[in-house]
């Protein structure tokens, strides 16, 4: 069902997460009242989508800065002359994509990213969708007993195993697209259950990409419970799937969602621009 506010048309695309927003041109100076409604939709749905947007890199940056300070990505190739924009690229001859597993961006930072904005420039004729999962729903549907156990726990996150020398040694075809292995020295500890700083809702905050284990537990001890949480969090009813077109934009809340870029378009090019917004310490 499409929801109309008089300012924007907002169409949820699943029961748990994600909504398309129509009736706004992001290259314009968005009026404050309209922007406030976009922010409300971002908080409510966890990821918001826009269609048929034609933005220059400068306009991409201007829109991103409306949300906060931009994080300069340490590991992705940057768009020429625009260090604020990370290039997410897969060429027709490349097999491995970037982001092809469930994760949330920057959980390895002591102040994790607020969110990430992905701008579609070139997309395959079919495939290359991104799936999102709601960590609000993941937490809210746990048993009271497991909620009580997790409430007092923290988890260890790291960039080392994903972007560090061990990844570079694999010599897969992400070499050249993912760089600066020596900069992958971030480790952080965060609560397993966080209270979202804007919405006040509780969310599960571990992820398969960057979480190593629970604080005070060994990795081996942590693995069974983490695997249970990961399987639970990706139940189909907690997810939505977004099909990209040129000019599509997705903006996801890293504190409330996971995402997974599907790698099913071999032989075709997919070029996206990503801008990440700085966040704050989680509690």
Image (tube, rainbow, N blue to C red):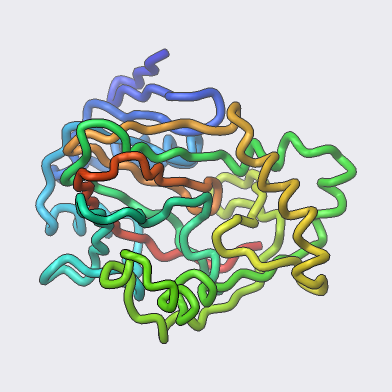
Query: In the displayed structure, would residue 232 be above or below residue 87?
Result: above
Query: Could you tell me which residue is drawn at 11 percent across and 41 percent down?
Result: 54
Residue 143: quadrant of the picture: top right
Judge from the rendering whether residue 250 lies leftward or rightward of residue 150; answer left or right: left
Q: Is residue 10 above or below residue 83?
A: above
Most extreme residue toward the right, as rendered? 145
Residue 276, image x, y percentages: 35, 60
Q: Nearer the viewer, residue 252 or 244?
A: 244
Quadrant in which the C terminus is drawn: bottom right
Nearer to the camera, 104 or 148: 104
Q: Position of residue 35 (x, y in %)?
A: 30, 41
x, y percentage for residue 274? 29, 56
Q: Is residue 221 visible?
A: yes
Q: Is residue 273 visible?
A: no
Query: Closest to the observer: 146 or 164?
Result: 164
Q: Is residue 122 left or right of residue 35?
A: left
The residue at 82%/74% (across/down) is 216
Using the image as rendered, state which of residue 169 and residue 165 is in the foreground: 169
* Number of marks in the rendered image: 0
As drawn, is 151 to the left or to the right of 189?
Answer: right
User: Looking at the figure, which quarter contains the N terminus?
Assistant: top left
Q: Eyeballing the image, is 12 above or below 130? A: above
Q: Which residue is pictured at 31% across the width and 34% down the height?
A: 127
Is residue 282 positioned above or below 10 on the image?
Answer: below
Residue found 41% across the figure and 65% down from its top: 278
């Amino acid at each position: 069902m499409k929801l109309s506010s008089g300012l924007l048309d907002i169409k949820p695309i699943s029961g748990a997460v994600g909504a398309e927003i129509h009736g706004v041109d992001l290259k314009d100076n968005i009026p404050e009242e309209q922007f406030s409604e976009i922010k409300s939709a971002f908080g409510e749905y966890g990821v918001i989508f826009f269609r048929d947007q034609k933005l220059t890199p400068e306009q991409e940056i201007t829109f991103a800065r409306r949300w906060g300070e931009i994080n300069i990505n340490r590991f992705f190739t940057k768009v020429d002359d625009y260090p604020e924009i990370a290039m997410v690229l897969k060429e027709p001859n490349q097999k491995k994509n970037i982001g092809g597993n469930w994760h949330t961006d920057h959980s390895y930072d002591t102040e994790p990213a607020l969110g990430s904005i992905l701008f579609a420039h070139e997309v395959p004729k079919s495939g290359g969708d991104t799936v999102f999962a709601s960590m609000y729903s993941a937490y809210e549907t746990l048993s009271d007993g497991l909620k009580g156990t997790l409430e007092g726990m923290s988890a260890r996150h790291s960039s080392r195993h994903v972007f560090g020398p061990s990844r570079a040694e694999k010599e897969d075809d992400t070499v050249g697209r993912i760089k600066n292995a020596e900069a992958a020295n971030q480790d952080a500890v965060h609560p397993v259950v966080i209270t979202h700083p804007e919405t006040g809702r509780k969310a599960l905050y571990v992820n398969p990409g960057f979480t190593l284990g629970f604080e005070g537990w060994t990795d081996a001890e942590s693995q069974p419970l983490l695997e249970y949480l990961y399987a639970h969090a990706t139940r189909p009813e907690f997810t939505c799937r977004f099909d990209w077109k040129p000019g599509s934009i997705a903006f996801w809340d890293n504190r409330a969602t996971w995402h997974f870029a599907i790698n099913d378009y071999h032989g075709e090019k997919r070029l996206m621009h990503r801008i990440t917004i700085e966040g704050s310490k989680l509690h």
